[in-house]
Image (tube, grey):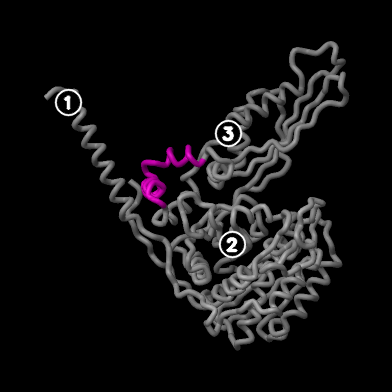
Amino acid sequence: MSTAQSLLQWVGAALLCVAVIVVVRTATFPSYQTRPPPCNATDQDFIPATRARLDRLSQAVTFRTVSYEPGRGTPEELRKFLAFLRASFPALHASPLVTREVVGNFSLLYRVQGSDRSLKPALLAAHLDVVPVTEEPGWEAEPFSGQQKDGFVYGRGTIDCKHNVLGQLEALEFHLNRGHRPRRALYLAYGHDEEVSGHYGARKIGELLEERGVKPEFILDEGLTVTKGVVPGVGKKVAMVAITEKGYVTVKLSVRVKGGHGSMPEKESAIGILSQAVTNLERNLQPNLWGSGPERDFAEHLATEMSLLPRLLTANLWLFTPVVRWVLAQKPSTNALCRTTTAVTRFNAGIKDNVIAPEAVAIVNHRVHPKQTIQEVLEHNLKVIDDPRVKMEVVESLVPAPVSPSGPESAAYMAIQESIQQIYPDSLVAPSVLMGNTDTRHYWNLTSAIYRFSPNVMTPEDLTRFHGVNERISVQDYERVMNFYFHLMRNVDKPLVVRRHEHDGDL
Protein backbone atom coordinates (compact mmCIF):
# COMPACT_ATOMS: atom_id res chain seq x y z
CA MET A 1 0.00 0.00 0.00
CA SER A 2 1.37 3.38 -0.97
CA THR A 3 1.93 6.22 1.48
CA ALA A 4 -0.86 8.22 -0.17
CA GLN A 5 -3.35 5.36 0.21
CA SER A 6 -2.36 4.86 3.82
CA LEU A 7 -2.82 8.57 4.50
CA LEU A 8 -6.26 8.55 2.86
CA GLN A 9 -7.30 5.60 5.01
CA TRP A 10 -6.21 7.41 8.17
CA VAL A 11 -8.04 10.55 7.08
CA GLY A 12 -11.16 8.54 6.26
CA ALA A 13 -11.07 6.77 9.60
CA ALA A 14 -10.64 10.07 11.43
CA LEU A 15 -13.56 11.63 9.56
CA LEU A 16 -15.71 8.59 10.33
CA CYS A 17 -14.85 8.88 14.04
CA VAL A 18 -15.76 12.57 14.00
CA ALA A 19 -19.04 11.80 12.23
CA VAL A 20 -19.91 9.11 14.78
CA ILE A 21 -19.13 11.47 17.68
CA VAL A 22 -21.28 14.21 16.10
CA VAL A 23 -24.23 11.87 15.62
CA VAL A 24 -23.98 10.34 19.09
CA ARG A 25 -23.70 13.70 20.83
CA THR A 26 -26.62 15.07 18.83
CA ALA A 27 -28.78 12.08 19.76
CA THR A 28 -27.80 11.97 23.43
CA PHE A 29 -27.31 15.65 24.30
CA PRO A 30 -29.06 16.22 27.64
CA SER A 31 -32.07 18.44 28.24
CA TYR A 32 -31.82 21.27 30.75
CA GLN A 33 -35.57 21.78 30.90
CA THR A 34 -37.87 20.88 33.78
CA ARG A 35 -41.55 19.98 33.80
CA PRO A 36 -43.01 21.12 37.12
CA PRO A 37 -46.76 20.93 37.75
CA PRO A 38 -48.36 23.83 35.85
CA CYS A 39 -50.29 26.66 37.44
CA ASN A 40 -53.97 26.35 36.48
CA ALA A 41 -56.79 28.86 36.73
CA THR A 42 -58.73 26.27 38.73
CA ASP A 43 -56.09 26.10 41.47
CA GLN A 44 -57.11 27.51 44.83
CA ASP A 45 -53.93 29.58 44.94
CA PHE A 46 -54.36 31.05 41.45
CA ILE A 47 -54.43 34.86 41.34
CA PRO A 48 -57.04 35.97 38.78
CA ALA A 49 -56.78 39.28 36.94
CA THR A 50 -59.87 40.72 38.58
CA ARG A 51 -61.25 44.14 37.78
CA ALA A 52 -59.77 45.50 41.02
CA ARG A 53 -56.28 44.22 40.22
CA LEU A 54 -56.39 45.51 36.65
CA ASP A 55 -57.63 48.87 37.86
CA ARG A 56 -54.70 49.11 40.26
CA LEU A 57 -52.27 48.55 37.40
CA SER A 58 -54.12 51.08 35.26
CA GLN A 59 -54.03 53.67 38.01
CA ALA A 60 -50.32 53.05 38.60
CA VAL A 61 -49.70 54.05 34.97
CA THR A 62 -51.42 57.40 35.47
CA PHE A 63 -48.64 58.62 37.77
CA ARG A 64 -46.13 60.36 35.50
CA THR A 65 -43.04 59.18 37.35
CA VAL A 66 -40.70 60.25 34.55
CA SER A 67 -36.91 60.37 34.90
CA TYR A 68 -35.27 62.86 32.55
CA GLU A 69 -31.63 62.83 33.66
CA PRO A 70 -29.75 62.03 36.89
CA GLY A 71 -31.21 64.16 39.66
CA ARG A 72 -34.04 65.50 37.51
CA GLY A 73 -37.35 63.72 37.63
CA THR A 74 -40.91 64.22 38.86
CA PRO A 75 -40.82 64.30 42.68
CA GLU A 76 -44.47 65.18 43.21
CA GLU A 77 -45.63 62.32 41.00
CA LEU A 78 -43.33 59.94 42.86
CA ARG A 79 -44.78 61.04 46.21
CA LYS A 80 -48.30 60.46 44.91
CA PHE A 81 -47.29 57.05 43.56
CA LEU A 82 -45.80 56.00 46.91
CA ALA A 83 -49.00 57.05 48.68
CA PHE A 84 -51.05 55.13 46.12
CA LEU A 85 -49.05 51.94 46.71
CA ARG A 86 -49.49 52.23 50.48
CA ALA A 87 -53.25 52.67 50.14
CA SER A 88 -53.64 49.94 47.51
CA PHE A 89 -52.20 47.07 49.55
CA PRO A 90 -53.65 47.31 53.06
CA ALA A 91 -52.85 43.77 54.23
CA LEU A 92 -49.21 44.14 53.28
CA HIS A 93 -48.78 47.51 54.97
CA ALA A 94 -50.67 46.47 58.10
CA SER A 95 -48.81 43.19 58.57
CA PRO A 96 -46.50 42.99 61.61
CA LEU A 97 -44.18 40.91 59.43
CA VAL A 98 -43.57 43.75 56.96
CA THR A 99 -41.43 46.85 57.35
CA ARG A 100 -41.39 49.64 54.77
CA GLU A 101 -38.67 52.24 54.31
CA VAL A 102 -38.39 55.18 51.95
CA VAL A 103 -34.77 55.40 50.75
CA GLY A 104 -33.23 58.33 48.91
CA ASN A 105 -36.47 60.30 49.32
CA PHE A 106 -38.51 58.34 46.76
CA SER A 107 -37.32 54.70 46.56
CA LEU A 108 -38.95 51.89 48.52
CA LEU A 109 -37.46 49.00 50.48
CA TYR A 110 -39.77 46.39 52.00
CA ARG A 111 -38.67 43.59 54.27
CA VAL A 112 -40.89 40.60 55.03
CA GLN A 113 -39.70 38.83 58.15
CA GLY A 114 -38.90 35.12 57.84
CA SER A 115 -39.19 32.56 60.62
CA ASP A 116 -36.05 30.58 59.69
CA ARG A 117 -32.90 32.61 60.28
CA SER A 118 -30.76 29.91 58.69
CA LEU A 119 -32.20 30.81 55.28
CA LYS A 120 -30.65 33.74 53.46
CA PRO A 121 -33.22 36.30 52.28
CA ALA A 122 -34.42 36.64 48.70
CA LEU A 123 -34.60 40.04 47.02
CA LEU A 124 -37.03 41.01 44.26
CA ALA A 125 -36.40 44.32 42.52
CA ALA A 126 -38.09 46.62 40.03
CA HIS A 127 -38.28 50.37 39.51
CA LEU A 128 -40.89 53.09 39.91
CA ASP A 129 -39.81 55.48 37.17
CA VAL A 130 -40.46 55.49 33.43
CA VAL A 131 -38.92 57.08 30.36
CA PRO A 132 -40.46 60.21 28.83
CA VAL A 133 -43.06 60.04 26.11
CA THR A 134 -41.91 61.70 22.89
CA GLU A 135 -44.10 63.57 20.44
CA GLU A 136 -44.03 60.57 18.12
CA PRO A 137 -47.59 59.90 16.85
CA GLY A 138 -49.36 56.57 16.78
CA TRP A 139 -50.48 55.95 20.36
CA GLU A 140 -53.77 54.04 20.37
CA ALA A 141 -54.42 55.23 23.94
CA GLU A 142 -53.14 58.24 25.85
CA PRO A 143 -49.74 57.11 27.20
CA PHE A 144 -50.49 57.93 30.85
CA SER A 145 -54.13 56.89 30.81
CA GLY A 146 -53.73 53.24 31.79
CA GLN A 147 -56.63 52.60 29.43
CA GLN A 148 -57.94 49.04 29.26
CA LYS A 149 -58.74 48.24 25.67
CA ASP A 150 -59.20 45.06 23.62
CA GLY A 151 -57.65 42.85 26.30
CA PHE A 152 -54.66 45.11 26.97
CA VAL A 153 -53.66 47.76 29.49
CA TYR A 154 -51.97 50.65 27.67
CA GLY A 155 -49.47 53.17 28.94
CA ARG A 156 -45.92 54.04 29.83
CA GLY A 157 -44.66 51.58 32.43
CA THR A 158 -46.89 48.63 31.57
CA ILE A 159 -43.83 46.60 30.47
CA ASP A 160 -41.05 48.77 31.92
CA CYS A 161 -41.68 48.09 34.64
CA LYS A 162 -44.67 48.98 36.82
CA HIS A 163 -46.16 45.61 35.94
CA ASN A 164 -43.36 44.02 37.96
CA VAL A 165 -43.86 46.39 40.91
CA LEU A 166 -47.62 45.83 41.01
CA GLY A 167 -47.27 42.12 40.24
CA GLN A 168 -44.91 41.55 43.16
CA LEU A 169 -47.07 43.53 45.56
CA GLU A 170 -50.25 41.76 44.41
CA ALA A 171 -48.55 38.38 44.93
CA LEU A 172 -47.33 39.31 48.40
CA GLU A 173 -50.72 40.78 49.38
CA PHE A 174 -52.41 37.57 48.19
CA HIS A 175 -49.90 35.43 50.10
CA LEU A 176 -50.37 37.35 53.34
CA ASN A 177 -54.16 37.38 53.00
CA ARG A 178 -54.05 33.58 52.88
CA GLY A 179 -52.38 33.61 56.29
CA HIS A 180 -48.92 32.74 55.03
CA ARG A 181 -45.99 33.25 57.41
CA PRO A 182 -42.78 33.03 55.37
CA ARG A 183 -39.80 30.95 56.42
CA ARG A 184 -37.35 32.87 54.22
CA ALA A 185 -37.10 36.63 54.66
CA LEU A 186 -38.00 38.58 51.53
CA TYR A 187 -36.92 42.04 50.40
CA LEU A 188 -38.67 44.12 47.76
CA ALA A 189 -36.49 46.94 46.39
CA TYR A 190 -37.93 49.62 44.12
CA GLY A 191 -35.59 52.34 42.87
CA HIS A 192 -37.01 55.61 41.57
CA ASP A 193 -34.40 56.57 38.93
CA GLU A 194 -33.36 53.37 37.16
CA GLU A 195 -33.93 54.92 33.75
CA VAL A 196 -31.10 57.39 34.45
CA SER A 197 -28.66 54.94 36.09
CA GLY A 198 -30.16 54.63 39.59
CA HIS A 199 -27.59 56.73 41.40
CA TYR A 200 -30.09 58.22 43.86
CA GLY A 201 -32.35 55.19 44.25
CA ALA A 202 -30.99 51.66 43.87
CA ARG A 203 -27.49 52.82 44.72
CA LYS A 204 -28.74 54.09 48.09
CA ILE A 205 -30.65 50.85 48.65
CA GLY A 206 -27.58 48.78 47.83
CA GLU A 207 -25.40 50.80 50.18
CA LEU A 208 -27.97 50.49 52.96
CA LEU A 209 -28.26 46.73 52.61
CA GLU A 210 -24.49 46.36 52.48
CA GLU A 211 -24.10 48.40 55.66
CA ARG A 212 -26.59 46.10 57.37
CA GLY A 213 -24.75 43.00 56.23
CA VAL A 214 -27.65 41.67 54.15
CA LYS A 215 -26.48 38.85 51.88
CA PRO A 216 -29.38 37.61 49.74
CA GLU A 217 -29.57 34.07 48.45
CA PHE A 218 -30.36 35.64 45.09
CA ILE A 219 -31.67 38.84 43.49
CA LEU A 220 -34.23 38.96 40.69
CA ASP A 221 -34.74 42.25 38.86
CA GLU A 222 -36.38 43.25 35.58
CA GLY A 223 -34.74 41.99 32.43
CA LEU A 224 -35.31 39.71 29.48
CA THR A 225 -38.73 38.18 28.88
CA VAL A 226 -40.56 35.19 27.50
CA THR A 227 -40.02 35.48 23.75
CA LYS A 228 -41.99 34.10 20.86
CA GLY A 229 -40.61 33.76 17.35
CA VAL A 230 -37.27 35.29 18.30
CA VAL A 231 -34.83 32.36 18.57
CA PRO A 232 -34.03 30.76 15.17
CA GLY A 233 -34.59 27.02 15.02
CA VAL A 234 -36.81 26.93 18.12
CA GLY A 235 -40.58 26.77 17.71
CA LYS A 236 -41.54 27.05 21.38
CA LYS A 237 -41.58 30.13 23.57
CA VAL A 238 -38.18 30.84 25.13
CA ALA A 239 -37.85 32.51 28.52
CA MET A 240 -34.50 34.26 28.68
CA VAL A 241 -33.06 34.74 32.15
CA ALA A 242 -30.15 37.17 32.00
CA ILE A 243 -27.26 36.05 34.17
CA THR A 244 -25.07 39.00 33.27
CA GLU A 245 -25.20 42.38 31.54
CA LYS A 246 -22.94 43.80 28.92
CA GLY A 247 -20.77 46.66 30.11
CA TYR A 248 -20.22 49.83 28.15
CA VAL A 249 -17.55 52.35 27.35
CA THR A 250 -18.16 55.60 25.50
CA VAL A 251 -15.10 57.20 23.96
CA LYS A 252 -14.49 60.59 22.42
CA LEU A 253 -12.24 60.66 19.35
CA SER A 254 -10.82 64.01 18.36
CA VAL A 255 -8.43 65.45 15.80
CA ARG A 256 -6.98 68.97 15.79
CA VAL A 257 -5.14 70.42 12.81
CA LYS A 258 -4.34 73.80 11.40
CA GLY A 259 -7.48 75.55 10.15
CA GLY A 260 -7.69 78.04 7.36
CA HIS A 261 -9.60 79.13 4.30
CA GLY A 262 -11.22 76.53 2.10
CA SER A 263 -9.36 77.88 -0.93
CA MET A 264 -5.96 76.66 0.36
CA PRO A 265 -6.48 73.24 2.00
CA GLU A 266 -3.70 71.05 3.39
CA LYS A 267 -3.29 67.49 2.11
CA GLU A 268 -5.39 66.13 5.00
CA SER A 269 -8.16 67.64 7.07
CA ALA A 270 -9.34 66.96 10.60
CA ILE A 271 -12.56 65.61 9.12
CA GLY A 272 -10.72 63.32 6.72
CA ILE A 273 -8.35 61.98 9.39
CA LEU A 274 -11.18 61.30 11.82
CA SER A 275 -13.37 59.79 9.11
CA GLN A 276 -10.60 57.31 8.33
CA ALA A 277 -10.31 56.43 12.02
CA VAL A 278 -14.05 55.80 12.26
CA THR A 279 -13.98 53.75 9.05
CA ASN A 280 -11.16 51.63 10.49
CA LEU A 281 -13.23 50.95 13.62
CA GLU A 282 -16.29 49.93 11.64
CA ARG A 283 -14.34 47.71 9.25
CA ASN A 284 -12.24 46.03 11.95
CA LEU A 285 -14.75 44.96 14.58
CA GLN A 286 -13.94 43.85 18.10
CA PRO A 287 -13.14 40.10 18.24
CA ASN A 288 -15.95 37.56 17.89
CA LEU A 289 -16.13 35.88 21.31
CA TRP A 290 -19.23 33.78 20.84
CA GLY A 291 -18.91 30.53 22.73
CA SER A 292 -16.62 31.87 25.41
CA GLY A 293 -19.37 33.41 27.54
CA PRO A 294 -22.96 32.82 28.71
CA GLU A 295 -24.23 32.85 25.14
CA ARG A 296 -22.85 29.29 24.84
CA ASP A 297 -24.98 28.20 27.81
CA PHE A 298 -27.99 29.81 26.16
CA ALA A 299 -27.56 27.70 23.03
CA GLU A 300 -26.89 24.47 24.92
CA HIS A 301 -29.95 24.90 27.13
CA LEU A 302 -32.10 24.99 23.99
CA ALA A 303 -30.25 22.37 21.93
CA THR A 304 -32.63 19.46 22.49
CA GLU A 305 -35.60 21.55 21.32
CA MET A 306 -34.01 22.85 18.10
CA SER A 307 -34.66 21.65 14.59
CA LEU A 308 -32.13 19.12 13.30
CA LEU A 309 -29.35 21.28 11.81
CA PRO A 310 -29.20 23.87 14.64
CA ARG A 311 -29.33 21.00 17.15
CA LEU A 312 -26.44 19.21 15.43
CA LEU A 313 -24.34 22.38 15.51
CA THR A 314 -25.20 23.28 19.10
CA ALA A 315 -24.67 19.79 20.49
CA ASN A 316 -21.19 19.79 18.93
CA LEU A 317 -19.77 23.21 19.67
CA TRP A 318 -16.40 21.55 20.25
CA LEU A 319 -16.33 21.28 16.46
CA PHE A 320 -18.75 23.87 15.07
CA THR A 321 -18.15 26.98 17.20
CA PRO A 322 -16.40 28.79 14.29
CA VAL A 323 -19.39 28.06 12.04
CA VAL A 324 -21.89 29.31 14.61
CA ARG A 325 -19.79 32.44 15.18
CA TRP A 326 -19.80 33.26 11.48
CA VAL A 327 -23.53 32.67 11.05
CA LEU A 328 -24.53 34.77 14.05
CA ALA A 329 -22.23 37.62 13.04
CA GLN A 330 -24.25 38.21 9.87
CA LYS A 331 -27.21 39.93 11.58
CA PRO A 332 -27.00 42.96 13.90
CA SER A 333 -29.32 41.37 16.48
CA THR A 334 -27.25 38.20 16.84
CA ASN A 335 -23.91 39.87 16.16
CA ALA A 336 -24.45 41.80 19.40
CA LEU A 337 -24.30 38.47 21.27
CA CYS A 338 -20.95 37.64 19.72
CA ARG A 339 -18.79 40.60 20.52
CA THR A 340 -18.33 44.06 21.94
CA THR A 341 -20.29 46.25 19.57
CA THR A 342 -19.06 49.50 18.05
CA ALA A 343 -21.58 52.26 17.38
CA VAL A 344 -20.57 55.69 16.09
CA THR A 345 -23.30 57.85 17.59
CA ARG A 346 -22.11 61.43 16.95
CA PHE A 347 -19.79 63.24 14.52
CA ASN A 348 -19.23 66.98 14.81
CA ALA A 349 -16.99 69.22 12.75
CA GLY A 350 -16.95 72.46 10.81
CA ILE A 351 -18.02 76.02 11.48
CA LYS A 352 -18.60 77.49 8.00
CA ASP A 353 -18.90 76.34 4.41
CA ASN A 354 -15.62 77.89 3.26
CA VAL A 355 -13.55 77.40 6.44
CA ILE A 356 -11.37 74.35 7.06
CA ALA A 357 -12.45 72.79 10.35
CA PRO A 358 -9.65 72.97 12.91
CA GLU A 359 -11.22 70.15 14.93
CA ALA A 360 -13.37 67.09 14.37
CA VAL A 361 -14.96 65.07 17.16
CA ALA A 362 -16.73 61.70 17.12
CA ILE A 363 -18.44 59.77 19.91
CA VAL A 364 -18.25 55.98 19.82
CA ASN A 365 -20.30 53.76 22.11
CA HIS A 366 -19.18 50.20 22.83
CA ARG A 367 -21.32 47.59 24.57
CA VAL A 368 -18.73 45.33 26.15
CA HIS A 369 -18.94 41.54 25.94
CA PRO A 370 -18.75 39.79 29.35
CA LYS A 371 -15.49 38.08 28.38
CA GLN A 372 -13.72 41.29 27.41
CA THR A 373 -12.31 44.07 29.56
CA ILE A 374 -12.67 47.75 28.87
CA GLN A 375 -8.90 48.03 28.58
CA GLU A 376 -8.90 45.37 25.86
CA VAL A 377 -11.56 47.32 23.98
CA LEU A 378 -9.50 50.51 24.13
CA GLU A 379 -6.32 48.72 23.06
CA HIS A 380 -8.14 47.26 20.05
CA ASN A 381 -9.32 50.75 19.09
CA LEU A 382 -5.82 52.21 19.25
CA LYS A 383 -4.39 49.35 17.22
CA VAL A 384 -7.07 49.64 14.53
CA ILE A 385 -6.97 53.44 14.27
CA ASP A 386 -3.16 53.41 14.20
CA ASP A 387 -2.84 57.19 13.98
CA PRO A 388 -1.31 59.24 16.82
CA ARG A 389 -3.13 62.36 15.56
CA VAL A 390 -6.42 60.81 16.73
CA LYS A 391 -6.82 61.34 20.46
CA MET A 392 -9.05 58.95 22.40
CA GLU A 393 -10.69 59.89 25.70
CA VAL A 394 -12.99 57.76 27.84
CA VAL A 395 -16.21 59.65 28.54
CA GLU A 396 -18.04 57.03 30.61
CA SER A 397 -17.69 53.34 31.31
CA LEU A 398 -19.13 50.40 33.23
CA VAL A 399 -17.50 46.99 33.36
CA PRO A 400 -19.62 43.97 32.37
CA ALA A 401 -21.63 42.52 35.24
CA PRO A 402 -20.29 39.42 36.98
CA VAL A 403 -21.71 36.21 35.52
CA SER A 404 -24.16 34.56 37.91
CA PRO A 405 -24.38 30.77 38.24
CA SER A 406 -27.02 29.02 36.15
CA GLY A 407 -28.28 25.59 35.23
CA PRO A 408 -29.03 22.63 37.49
CA GLU A 409 -26.09 23.33 39.78
CA SER A 410 -27.57 26.69 40.81
CA ALA A 411 -30.48 26.19 43.19
CA ALA A 412 -31.66 29.80 42.88
CA TYR A 413 -31.62 29.71 39.07
CA MET A 414 -33.56 26.45 39.08
CA ALA A 415 -36.19 27.92 41.42
CA ILE A 416 -36.66 30.77 38.93
CA GLN A 417 -36.77 28.33 36.00
CA GLU A 418 -39.36 26.10 37.64
CA SER A 419 -41.49 29.12 38.55
CA ILE A 420 -41.40 30.23 34.91
CA GLN A 421 -42.37 26.81 33.61
CA GLN A 422 -45.22 26.56 36.10
CA ILE A 423 -46.70 29.71 34.55
CA TYR A 424 -45.51 29.05 30.97
CA PRO A 425 -45.60 25.23 30.78
CA ASP A 426 -45.04 25.35 27.01
CA SER A 427 -41.86 27.41 27.30
CA LEU A 428 -38.15 26.68 27.42
CA VAL A 429 -35.82 28.50 29.82
CA ALA A 430 -32.23 29.48 29.09
CA PRO A 431 -29.58 31.75 30.63
CA SER A 432 -28.70 34.75 28.51
CA VAL A 433 -26.98 38.13 28.33
CA LEU A 434 -28.79 41.45 28.79
CA MET A 435 -27.61 44.09 26.32
CA GLY A 436 -28.73 47.03 28.48
CA ASN A 437 -28.19 47.77 32.16
CA THR A 438 -30.45 47.59 35.19
CA ASP A 439 -30.39 48.65 38.83
CA THR A 440 -28.56 45.41 39.63
CA ARG A 441 -25.29 47.25 38.98
CA HIS A 442 -25.75 48.67 42.47
CA TYR A 443 -26.24 45.24 44.05
CA TRP A 444 -23.11 43.43 42.87
CA ASN A 445 -21.59 43.48 46.37
CA LEU A 446 -24.61 41.78 47.93
CA THR A 447 -24.58 38.39 46.17
CA SER A 448 -23.08 36.49 43.25
CA ALA A 449 -26.51 35.20 42.20
CA ILE A 450 -28.22 38.05 40.32
CA TYR A 451 -30.84 37.39 37.66
CA ARG A 452 -32.80 39.64 35.34
CA PHE A 453 -36.17 38.50 34.04
CA SER A 454 -39.60 40.01 33.44
CA PRO A 455 -42.38 37.38 33.31
CA ASN A 456 -44.32 38.64 30.28
CA VAL A 457 -44.30 37.64 26.61
CA MET A 458 -42.56 39.75 23.97
CA THR A 459 -42.98 39.08 20.26
CA PRO A 460 -40.73 40.73 17.64
CA GLU A 461 -43.50 43.31 17.16
CA ASP A 462 -43.64 44.02 20.89
CA LEU A 463 -39.93 44.87 21.05
CA THR A 464 -40.66 48.25 19.44
CA ARG A 465 -43.11 49.07 22.25
CA PHE A 466 -40.34 48.98 24.84
CA HIS A 467 -39.58 52.69 25.49
CA GLY A 468 -41.67 53.31 22.39
CA VAL A 469 -45.16 53.94 21.12
CA ASN A 470 -48.12 51.87 22.34
CA GLU A 471 -46.42 50.31 25.33
CA ARG A 472 -48.93 47.80 26.63
CA ILE A 473 -49.41 44.49 28.43
CA SER A 474 -52.16 41.96 27.82
CA VAL A 475 -54.53 41.08 30.64
CA GLN A 476 -53.44 37.45 30.31
CA ASP A 477 -49.80 38.40 30.61
CA TYR A 478 -50.38 40.54 33.67
CA GLU A 479 -52.20 37.62 35.26
CA ARG A 480 -49.11 35.51 34.52
CA VAL A 481 -46.87 38.18 36.07
CA MET A 482 -48.77 38.06 39.37
CA ASN A 483 -48.81 34.27 39.45
CA PHE A 484 -45.14 33.97 38.55
CA TYR A 485 -44.12 36.09 41.52
CA PHE A 486 -46.50 34.22 43.80
CA HIS A 487 -45.09 30.86 42.77
CA LEU A 488 -41.53 32.13 43.07
CA MET A 489 -42.22 33.39 46.60
CA ARG A 490 -43.65 29.99 47.46
CA ASN A 491 -40.92 27.98 45.72
CA VAL A 492 -38.05 29.74 47.49
CA ASP A 493 -39.71 29.65 50.92
CA LYS A 494 -37.68 26.56 51.80
CA PRO A 495 -34.03 25.44 51.68
CA LEU A 496 -32.83 25.45 48.08
CA VAL A 497 -31.08 22.25 47.01
CA VAL A 498 -28.39 22.07 44.34
CA ARG A 499 -29.12 19.52 41.65
CA ARG A 500 -26.09 17.96 40.06
CA HIS A 501 -26.23 17.79 36.28
CA GLU A 502 -23.74 15.49 34.61
CA HIS A 503 -23.08 14.88 30.95
CA ASP A 504 -20.14 14.32 28.70
CA GLY A 505 -17.79 17.28 28.52
CA ASP A 506 -16.71 18.89 25.30
CA LEU A 507 -14.27 16.87 23.25
Asked if the stretch drawn in magenta spans residue 44, the answer is: no
Q: Which residue: 78% across, 24% down?
A: 256
What amino acid does circle 2 point to? Val
**Residue 72, position in %: x, y?**
84, 56
Residue bearing the label numbered 2: 457
* The magenta segment: 307-328
Which residue is at the far bottom? Answer: 179
- Rendered view: 161 above or below 380: below
Q: Could you tell me which quadrant the N terminus lies in?
A: top left
Report the predominant secondary structure element of the magenta stretch: helix
Q: Secondary structure at mark 2?
A: strand
Q: Is residue 297 visible?
A: no
Alpha-carbon span between mark 3 and mark 2:
33 Å
- Rendered view: 170 above or below 22: below
State the image quarter where residue 438 is shown: bottom right
**Between discs 3 and 1, the one toward the N terminus:** 1
**Residue 198, position in %: x, y?**
73, 58
Q: Which residue: 79% across, 20% down?
A: 257
Residue bearing the label numbered 1: 5
What amino acid does circle 1 point to? Gln
**Between discs 1 and 2, the one toward the N terminus:** 1
Q: Which is nearer the eye, 219 or 233?
A: 233
Residue bearing the label numbered 3: 285
